[in-house]
Image (spheres, rainbow, N blue to C red):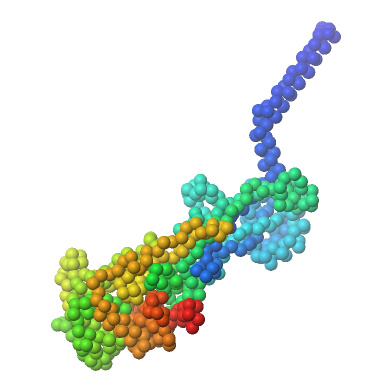
């Protein structure tokens, strides 16, 4: 039997072992694993909320915001609050905030399964948020935070260029972007300028830590702000981890007033569908670029939130990628080809409403005919028979050659949208021989002479064509971004345009330019384009009606305007899809754009 001293020794050994194990455990907890457990404790004490940086503002040439940011509220749900009648409380909150009950139920269920405060709803209206704030103390499991939301003041009118934002739609997409600082709920450019210049516009996201109590409730809701001390805090229980920095601003060449004038005029046209392109002939600066029908980029943001699984596709930008037969607008090319080959402008051709070739008759748009016409009269009345004769005089090879020189059938696009480049098509005798294994016939020349047959051009090409006519063959690269500015307003990049004087089509005589301009002026003063005539201003243009085998003809009109000193100031092309005659459908649209330009530039 153990003596008392032996028992004491065992007891001392047992106590020593206990304290040794306890001390060793404390050593591991506080020293070896101390940092790990401190982080766990901090994570339980704080919850991190990311703040997406405001995107850079996109401005037009006058400083008007084409894409800006507005403040909205997001609703979060904290599952750590144990409340009675949870279903009834969810129903009440959905009513206060005008949310779909099923969507809110789903978000609350997800937060409870994950046992983590989670986003329950986005884009709460200010009115609904104020109603919630009045009753917030009764529903501590819910709280609101603010977020910057993209807003497009022009809506549908400029959507094809400015684009829209979307959320990351898949795990694969997220894996590609996460190393660039994106989170799964980040906004990013989904189309247009927003997508192409994402890295300039996005800014740098920030984050805040929200301190919570043992129930996971933000301390800013449970104690007054005066208790906060020590750390730099914006409110009790909230500390700044990393501030957010806005993206760079973007200044465009676009004029929002011309955009709205063009959009409203197109929407009011006979079909409501079409495009307008307006360029500064001197520099290539794009003043207007409009396509209808379109989409509301503000609505696209809401839809990506409500139905992120739906792959959204915008209506295609007709102004840049639409291809149409140019119709009688192309007659300016035929005119140059014929005059440069030596056609006497005083020579008269008789139009009886049709033109006969062996085995086929080609009609004029005016069934009863125009009678006898010289060059100016032929272009003024857009007489098909006159240009059938002029085309045969010039020859198909010469016409197609001049078309290519004026960048028809070639890749010409707005500098910032190279992937939207459309070459169109100009048929040539060589092409027909190589591709169709057939010879070029007189009927091919007649179709080419009036811009029909297989000829295809884009609205941008037609605007560029008339910008070249205004500058007597000078071509400037169209562009849309004027400058990029940092958040403090300093310009760190400015576009250097390829000026019109850097490229000029050679070998067009002054006499040809003078005759062509006289004819285009006659079109507007007393011909098919007289609806675009504005007293006191020199406007030169050409109408067109393009046959459409799939429906009603397309209506076209292209023109340019010179100021009092004779300097070209604006070139415009209009296409009204299925609009019928250019003089009826397209000319009024161009007039509205010209009137707005004159009012803003000259005070007319």
Is 169 in front, or is 115? 169
Q: Quadrant of residue 534?
A: bottom left
Query: Farthest front residue?
Result: 565
Vertical order, 188 against 282 (above or below): above
Could you tell me residue 370's position as x and y percent? 26, 91
Residue 242 or residue 224, whichever sits in front: 242
Q: Position of residue 152 (x, y in %)?
A: 54, 67
Residue 1, how many percent across, how many down?
82, 7
For image coordinates 29% across by 81% down, the residue present is 514
Which residue shows up at 39% across the image and 83% down it? 538
Asked if residue 589 can be seen in this view, the reply is no
**Quadrant hosting residue 9:** top right
Q: Is residue 126 left or right of residue 510?
A: right
Q: At 24% across and 88% down in the image, what residue appears?
A: 374
Q: Position of residue 144 (x, y in %)?
A: 68, 57
Question: Please, is residue 525 above or below residue 576 in the view?
Answer: below
Give left or right: position of 232 versus 291.
right
């Amino acid at each position: 039997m153990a003596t008392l001293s032996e028992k004491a020794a065992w007891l001392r050994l047992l106590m020593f072992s206990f304290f040794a194990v306890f001390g060793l455990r404390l050593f591991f907890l506080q020293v070896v694993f101390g940092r790990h457990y401190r982080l766990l404790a901090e994570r339980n004490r704080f919850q991190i909320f990311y703040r997406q940086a405001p995107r850079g503002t996109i401005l037009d040439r006058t400083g008007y915001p084409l894409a800006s940011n507005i403040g909205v509220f997001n609703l979060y749900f904290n599952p750590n609050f144990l409340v009675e009648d949870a279903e009834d409380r969810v129903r009440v909150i959905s009513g206060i905030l005008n949310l779909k009950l099923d969507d809110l139920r789903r978000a609350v269920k997800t937060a409870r399964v994950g046992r983590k405060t989670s986003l329950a709803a986005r884009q709460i209206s200010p009115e609904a948020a104020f109603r919630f704030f009045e009753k917030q103390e009764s529903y501590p499991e819910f709280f609101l935070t603010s977020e910057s939301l993209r807003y497009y003041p022009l809506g549908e009118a400029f959507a094809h260029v400015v684009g829209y934002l979307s959320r990351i739609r898949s795990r694969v997409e997220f894996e590609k972007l996460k190393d660039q600082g994106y989170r799964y709920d980040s906004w990013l450019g989904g189309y247009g300028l927003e997508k192409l210049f994402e890295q300039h516009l996005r800014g740098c996201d920030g984050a805040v830590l929200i301190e919570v109590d043992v129930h996971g409730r933000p301390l800013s809701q449970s104690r007054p702000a005066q208790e906060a001390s020590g750390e730099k805090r914006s409110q009790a229980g909230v500390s700044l981890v990393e501030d957010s920095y806005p993206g760079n601003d973007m200044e465009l060449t676009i004029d929002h007033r011309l955009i709205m004038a063009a959009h409203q005029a197109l929407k009011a046209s006979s079909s409501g569908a079409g495009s307008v392109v307006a360029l500064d002939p001197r520099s290539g600066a794009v003043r207007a670029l409009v396509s209808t029908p379109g989409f509301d980029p503000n609505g696209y943001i809401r839809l990506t939130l409500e139905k992120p699984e739906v792959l959204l596709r915008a209506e295609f930008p007709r102004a840049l990628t639409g291809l149409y037969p140019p119709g009688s607008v192309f007659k300016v090319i035929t005119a140059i080809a014929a005059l440069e080959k030596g056609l006497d402008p005083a020579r008269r051709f008789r139009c009886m409403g049709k033109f006969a070739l062996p085995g086929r008759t080609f009609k004029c748009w005016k069934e009863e005919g125009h009678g006898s016409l010289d060059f100016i009269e032929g272009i003024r009345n857009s007489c098909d028979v006159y240009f059938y004769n002029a085309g045969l005089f010039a020859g198909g090879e010469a016409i197609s050659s001049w078309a290519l020189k004026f960048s028809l059938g070639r890749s010409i696009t707005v500098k910032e949208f190279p992937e939207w480049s459309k070459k169109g098509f100009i048929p040539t005798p060589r092409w027909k021989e190589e591709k169709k294994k057939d010879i070029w016939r007189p009927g091919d020349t007649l179709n080419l002479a009036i811009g029909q047959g297989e000829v295809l051009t884009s609205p941008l090409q037609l605007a560029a064509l008339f910008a070249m006519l205004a500058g007597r063959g000078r071509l400037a690269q169209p562009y849309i971004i004027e400058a990029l500015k940092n958040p403090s307003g300093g310009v760190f990049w400015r576009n250097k345009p390829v000026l019109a004087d850097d490229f000029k089509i050679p070998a067009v005589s002054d006499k040809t330019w003078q005759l062509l301009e006289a004819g285009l002026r006659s079109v507007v003063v007393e011909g098919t384009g007289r609806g675009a005539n504005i007293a006191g201003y020199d406007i030169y243009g050409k109408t067109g009606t393009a046959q459409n085998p799939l429906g009603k003809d397309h209506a076209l009109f292209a023109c340019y305007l010179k100021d009092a000193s004779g300097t070209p100031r604006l070139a415009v092309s209009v296409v009204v899809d299925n609009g019928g005659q250019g003089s009826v459908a397209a000319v009024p649209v161009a007039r509205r754009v010209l009137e707005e330009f004159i009012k803003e530039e000259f005070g007319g």
